[in-house]
Amino acid sequence: MVWLAWAGYLAWLLAGTADFLCHRATDLPHTSGLGESAMHLVQLGLIGTGVFALLLLEIGWAVWALLALLVLAHAVVGYIDTRRAYGCREIRPFEQHVHSVLDMGPWIALGLVIAASWSSAAEPGWALRLRQPPLSAAVWALALAPAALLCGVPALLELRAALAARRGAPV
């Protein structure tokens, strides 16, 4: 079950990479620019906070609620992001389908986290507690390294290009 969840996570991250490639193909730095790029960083921050919560904290009601709020905020920011881009740059059909994956991934993950931890949490409680024992460094690396490489780096490159375009420098 864990490997299947990790494969789904990687597929979702690859969809993020595909989305950044779509942005590059439609010249985001010179169209919707810095505003849309900033929205992408906000979305990454929201989901990244959820990933850190899963890695760091015991799973119970408080973490479920935190994850639900982060996923909802991600959806709202995603809507604002798309509205910002609409009319500024072309959002092609492939990118629209990529957005479907990116939009549904966090909701599916939330459901899986709740389902997987429901039976193991006899009395989940509302306290935020550090995991005991902590997850291994390998688990942290398997969660964070692909996210950094597949989405973090492309997001920062997109931001750099949008800042350069704003300054009138070559992208």
Image: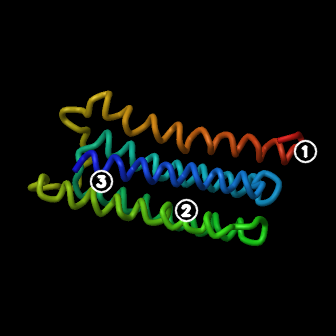
Name the residue at 32% across, 27% down. Answer: 137
> Which tag, 3 or 2, sits closer to the chain's start?
3
Discs 3/1, front: 1
Q: Is residue 132 left or right of residue 73?
A: left
Residue 12 placement (x, y as % from top left): 45, 54
Q: Quadrant of residue 131?
A: top left
For label 1, the SS is: loop
Residue 90 placement (x, y as % from top left): 74, 67
Name the residue at 72% across, 70% down. Answer: 86
Q: Is residue 24 left or right of residue 152?
A: right
For label 3, the SS is: helix
| Residue type at tag 3 | Val
Q: Which residue is mark 2?
A: 98
Q: Which residue is mark 3?
A: 63
Residue 82 placement (x, y as % from top left): 64, 67
Residue 43: assigned label = none
Residue projecting furthest to the left: 122
Cβ atoms at labels 3 and 2 below 8 Å apart:
no
> Which tag, 3 or 1, sits closer to the chain's start?
3
Q: Is residue 141 left or right of residue 152?
A: left
Within 10 Å of the Cα at label 2, are there few (<14), some (14-19), or many (20+) other Cα atoms? Answer: some
Discs 3/2, front: 2
Query: Does 59 sit above or below residue 112?
Result: above
| Residue type at tag 1 | Gly
Q: Which residue is mark 1?
A: 168
Residue projecting furthest to the top: 137
| Residue placed most toward the observer, 43 or 89 | 89
Q: CA distance from mark 3 to mark 1?
A: 44 Å
